[in-house]
Image (tube, helix red, strand yellow):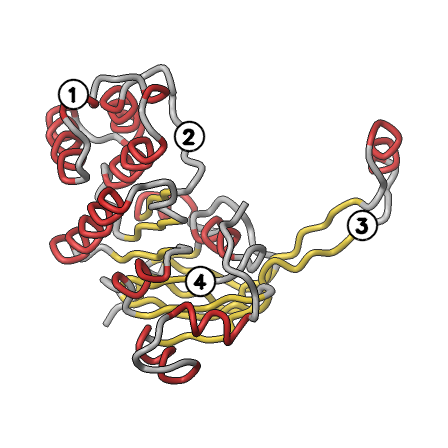
C-alpha cells in the first residue's frame, strides 16, 4: 500500500530566554540572555499508509501539536524529514499544501460572518468553483448536523461546538488527500462528537482520505484509529493498533486509558 505520510527522524527544539519578566527581562533577552532548550520532538519516525486513520496520543507538552504543525508545513524541523505522498514538506511546501488540510482546536474565523460566508471565503481562497463550493458546503454542514437556520448566523453567535463543525467543514472543502485533525471534537457535546466521528469514517470510506488525529478522547481514538502512536517527552513510546496496545500494556478487555497511564504515568488533561 502507498505511504501517505513518512516521518523520518524528526526532531524539533525550541529555545526560551531565561531573562526574567518585565521591561528589564525584555532588554536582557535582546542582549542575548540565557537560553533554555526545550526538546519538543526527538527522533520521531513512523509511516502512515494511504487511507489509514492514524492516532497520536500523549500528555500535555508531549509534542503532538508540534508534530501536526510540521506535517502541515507550519514549522520547520531541526532534523529529519517529512514526506506527504512522496513530497518533502520543506522543499515542496506549496505542493504539499494542495494535498492537505488541517483542523485545530483553536480554529480562526471571521466571527462577524456566518458559516456560509466563512466557507465561501475559504472556497475562493482554495480555488473551489462557485456552484461546486456551494453544494459541497451545504452538504458537509448538513452531514455534520448543523441546522439550516444556523448557516446564516454570525459565527460569534454560535456555540463553540458549532464553530468547530464549521472548521471541519472548511477543511473538507478541498477534499484533501491527507486530513490533519488536531483535537477536532474538543468542546462538542456527545451527539455532535459522534456526528463528526461518523463523518470522518465516511470520508475515509468514500474518498479514501488519510487522517492523522490527535485527541484526548480515548473512546474516540479507539473507535476511529487503525493504529496509534503514544508520545511522551517528545518521543514515541509505543505504536500499534488499539487492540495491540491494550494487549501489550494493559488488558485486551481494558481501555486505551489504561495503556496511557501504564506508559506515561501522567494525569490525563486537556492541552493548552
Q: CA distance from mark 3 to mark 1?
A: 52 Å
Q: Quadrant of the C terminus?
A: top right
Number of the front mark, 2 or 1:
1
Q: Which mark is residue 35?
A: 3
Number of the front mark, 4 or 3:
4
Classed neighbour count for the residue bearing mark 2: other residues with Cα under 10 Å, few (<14), some (14–19), many (≥20): few
Q: Position of residue 57 (x, y in %)?
A: 44, 62
Q: Which residue is mark 4?
A: 57
Dot 1: element: helix
Sequence-earlier tag: 3 or 1? 3
Classed neighbour count for the residue bearing mark 3: other residues with Cα under 10 Å, few (<14), some (14–19), many (≥20): few
Sequence-earlier tag: 4 or 3? 3
Q: Decide which of 148, 124 is in the foreground and name it.
A: 148
Q: CA distance from mark 3 to mark 2?
A: 31 Å
The relative height of residue 83 versus residue 229 in the rendered view (above or below) is: above
Q: Quadrant of the N terminus?
A: bottom left
Q: Which residue is mark 1?
A: 149
State left or right for residue 21 relative to residue 98.
right
Q: CA distance from mark 1 to mark 4?
A: 36 Å
**Image quarter of residue 111:** top left
Q: Which residue is mark 2?
A: 108
Instruction: Please report the residue visible at 35 percent of the width from the left and 71 percent of the height from the top.
Output: 255
Number of the front mark, 1 or 4:
1
Dot 4: element: strand
Sequence-earlier tag: 1 or 4? 4
Number of the front mark, 2 or 4:
4
Amino acid at each position: 500500500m502507498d505511504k501517505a505520510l513518512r516521518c523520518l527522524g524528526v526532531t524539533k527544539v525550541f529555545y526560551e530566554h531565561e531573562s526574567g519578566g518585565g521591561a528589564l527581562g525584555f532588554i536582557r533577552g535582546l542582549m542575548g540572555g540565557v537560553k533554555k532548550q526545550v526538546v519538543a520532538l526527538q527522533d520521531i519516525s513512523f509511516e502512515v499508509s494511504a487511507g489509514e486513520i492514524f492516532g497520536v496520543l500523549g500528555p500535555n507538552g508531549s509534542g503532538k501539536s508540534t508534530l501536526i504543525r510540521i506535517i502541515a508545513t507550519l514549522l520547520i524541523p531541526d532534523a529529519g524529514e517529512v514526506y506527504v505522498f512522496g513530497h518533502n514538506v520543506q522543499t515542496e511546501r506549496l505542493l504539499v499544501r494542495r494535498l492537505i488540510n488541517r483542523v485545530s482546536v483553536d480554529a480562526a474565523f471571521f466571527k462577524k460572518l456566518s458559516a456560509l460566508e466563512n466557507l465561501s471565503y475559504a472556497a475562493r481562497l482554495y480555488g473551489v468553483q462557485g456552484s461546486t463550493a456551494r453544494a459541497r458546503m451545504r452538504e458537509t454542514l448538513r452531514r455534520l448536523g448543523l441546522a439550516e437556520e444556523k448557516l446564516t448566523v454570525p459565527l460569534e453567535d454560535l456555540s463553540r461546538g458549532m464553530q468547530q463543525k464549521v472548521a471541519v467543514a472548511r477543511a473538507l472543502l478541498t477534499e484533501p488527500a491527507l486530513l490533519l485533525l488536531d483535537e477536532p471534537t474538543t468542546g462538542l457535546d456527545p451527539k455532535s462528537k459522534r456526528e463528526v466521528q461518523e463523518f470522518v469514517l465516511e470520508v475515509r470510506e468514500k474518498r479514501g482520505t488519510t487522517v492523522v488525529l490527535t485527541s484526548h478522547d480515548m473512546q474516540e481514538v479507539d473507535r476511529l484509529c487503525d493504529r496509534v502512536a503514544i508520545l511522551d517527552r517528545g518521543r514515541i513510546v509505543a505504536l500499534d493498533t488499539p487492540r495491540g496496545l491494550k494487549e501489550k500494556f494493559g488488558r485486551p478487555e481494558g481501555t486505551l486509558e489504561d495503556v496511557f497511564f501504564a506508559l506515561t504515568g501522567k494525569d490525563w488533561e486537556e492541552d493548552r
